[in-house]
């Protein structure tokens, strides 16, 4: 009895991913149109959540795929924020254009930072990034041109009406989400994504198969710095003020670690789930202060010990329904 001929095809999309893509389009459209239907308070929440999503996604790409655990990403948030304020306030650049120009600062800072720390590994690399962030904070605090520790205020924003500012903010947030989440998805589905996955699983084996681990890590480090700086510039432009203590606050690193560890490291969906958990938990329980932070820390520890895949990993055990599938599945079809 002859066997039917089997035709093989590579499956990239799934029913769950098609639904997720449709929801993403709806969310982006809803975000961009918020100034015409949402309150100013809800718009501020959307800006904050967008920044959390972007920063966490960049840390997830950095630690979950490149294997570079950083606790100093606040350095890129601070330098992007300060460059935005200097360009807009001191040089008269349109503040919304200055947001894009400010991305030069984290890119420039990321190059010597990586070259300085690239020989370090594991906890030594993490400590090195924190030292760099603290050094940049101390330097910023002592530069009179940047008003030292008193910080800067974005007074030029008074030239625009509240509606104009809100329209610009939601457009920038939409671009931020497309660049960070959409960019990560596009990257992980490309040939570079295959190299990143191989490097995540075993960097030595990946190098033996021709993957230039050092160059790829360098590129991811710069990309993560730029994406993180983009979010920082938008966040502090919305705040209208930046200080060294705020811009270079270690809170940004701890927030990223919590979001990614609880949501699920090494998965685009994990960073999204973790950011939503953190955002709503902060709204509901943030008033409890230090007790709330202790609970967040214990939750992170429990997840790290007993559910390393995070909440997203637990959800996937109930069924394989990816929102952003990056794997390639070989499907055999009978041809009679």
Image (tube, rainbow, N blue to C red):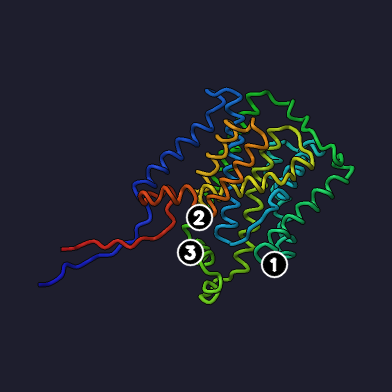
Q: Nearer the viewer, mark 2 or mark 1?
A: 2
Q: Which residue is mark 3?
A: 194
Q: CA distance from mark 1 to mark 3?
A: 25 Å
**Dot 1: element:** loop
Visible residue check, residue 186: no
Most foreground residue, 34 or 61:
61
**Cβ atoms at labels 2 and 3 below 8 Å apart:** no
Q: Which residue is mark 1?
A: 120
Most foreground residue, 306 or 180:
306
x, y percentage for residue 293?
64, 40
Q: Which residue is mark 2?
A: 308
Visible residue check, residue 37: yes
**Cβ atoms at labels 1 and 3 below 8 Å apart:** no
Which residue sits at x=37%, y=46%?
A: 16
x, y percentage for residue 210?
53, 75
Q: Nearer the viewer, mark 2 or mark 3?
A: 2
Indicate whether 44 appears above or below 244.
Answer: above
Report the number of discs.
3
Q: On the rendered image, what quadrant is the C terminus found in?
A: bottom left
Q: Earlier in the sequence, mark 2 or mark 1?
A: 1
């Amino acid at each position: 009895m002859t066997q039917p001929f089997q035709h093989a095809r590579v499956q990239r999309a799934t029913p769950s991913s098609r639904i997720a893509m449709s929801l993403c389009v709806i969310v982006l459209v809803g975000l961009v149109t918020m100034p015409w239907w949402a309150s100013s308070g809800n718009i501020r929440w959307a800006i904050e959540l967008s920044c959390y999503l972007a920063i966490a996604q960049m840390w997830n790409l950095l630690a979950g795929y490149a294997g570079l655990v950083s606790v100093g990403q606040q350095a890129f948030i601070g330098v992007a924020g300060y460059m935005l304020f200097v360009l807009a306030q001191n040089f008269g650049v349109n503040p919304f254009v200055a947001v894009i120009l400010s991305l030069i600062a984290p890119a420039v800072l990321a190059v010597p930072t990586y070259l300085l720390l690239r020989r370090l590994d594991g906890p030594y690399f993490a400590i090195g990034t924190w030292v760099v962030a603290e050094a940049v904070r101390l330097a910023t605090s002592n530069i009179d041109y940047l008003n030292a520790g008193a910080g800067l205020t974005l007074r030029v924003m008074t030239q625009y009406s509240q509606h104009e500012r809100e329209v610009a903010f939601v457009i920038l947030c939409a671009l931020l989400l497309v660049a960070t989440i959409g960019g990560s998805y596009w990257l992980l589905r490309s040939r570079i994504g295959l190299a990143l996955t191989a490097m995540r699983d075993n960097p030595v084996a990946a190098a033996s198969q021709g993957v230039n681990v050092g160059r790829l890590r360098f590129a991811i480090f710069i990309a993560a710095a730029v994406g993180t700086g983009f979010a920082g510039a938008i966040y502090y432009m919305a705040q209208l003020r930046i200080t060294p203590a705020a811009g270079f606050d270690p809170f940004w690193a701890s927030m990223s670690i919590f979001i990614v560890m609880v949501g699920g490291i090494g998965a685009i969906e994990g960073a999204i789930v973790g950011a939503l958990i953190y955002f709503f938990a902060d709204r509901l329980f943030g008033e409890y202060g230090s007790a709330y932070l202790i609970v967040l820390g214990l939750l992170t520890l429990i997840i790290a010990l007993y559910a390393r895949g995070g909440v997203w990993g637990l959800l996937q055990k109930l069924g394989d329904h990816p929102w952003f599938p990056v794997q390639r599945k070989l499907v055999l079809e009978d041809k009679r």
